Image (tube, rainbow, N blue to C red):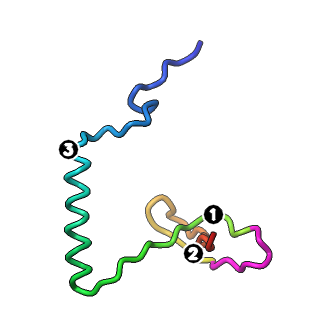
Amino acid sequence: MTEEPDDHHSSWQPSASLEMIRSRAQLLAKIRAYFEQAGVLEVETPVCSFHATTDPAIESFQLTYSGPGFPAPQPLYLQTSP
């Protein structure tokens, strides 16, 4: 027996209305403008992975994380540049 796909999860379209998406974009633009005016530089936070890079010429930076989802310390690796 096959299960019917959940319409909510099978659709690629966002569940938020276009009005809400525009409101969010405007809010983010205002927040970014405020911090830019204050001289704050926006940066992207690193992505962590369970595995290091397979490229032998690149040394991966390992860290140990424990927190939500990982009560015991878990080794993670920062994503290397593409």
- Any magenta on residue 40? no
Nearer the observer: mark 2 or 3; the answer is 3
Q: Residues within 10 Å of mark 3 (few under 14, many from 20)?
A: few
Q: Is residue 56 magenta?
A: yes
Indicate which disc, 2 or 3, sits on the residue closer to the N terminus: 3
- Marks 1, 2: nearer the viewer: 1
Tell me the residue at 78%/79% (across/down).
57
Percent position of residue 36, x then y: 26, 80
Q: Position of residue 21 (x, y in %)?
A: 26, 48
The residue pinned by badge 2 equals 64
Picture coordinates of residue 3 (x, y %)? 53, 18
The secondary structure type at the circle numbered 1 is loop
Q: Is residue 43 above or below residue 50?
A: below
Q: What is the crowding at mark 1: few (fewer than 14 residues within 10 Å), some, or many (at least 20)? A: few
Where is mark 1, residue-wise?
50
User: Mark 3 or 1, which is nearer the eye?
Assistant: 3
Q: Residue at x 26, y 72 (%)?
A: 32
12 sits left or right of 52 in the view: left
Between 40 and 73, the residue placed more toward the observer is: 40
From the image, tell me which residue sits under label 3.
Answer: 19
SS assignment at label 3: helix
Tell me what residue is drawn at x 48 percent, y 58 percent. 69
Q: Position of residue 55 (x, y in %)?
A: 77, 71
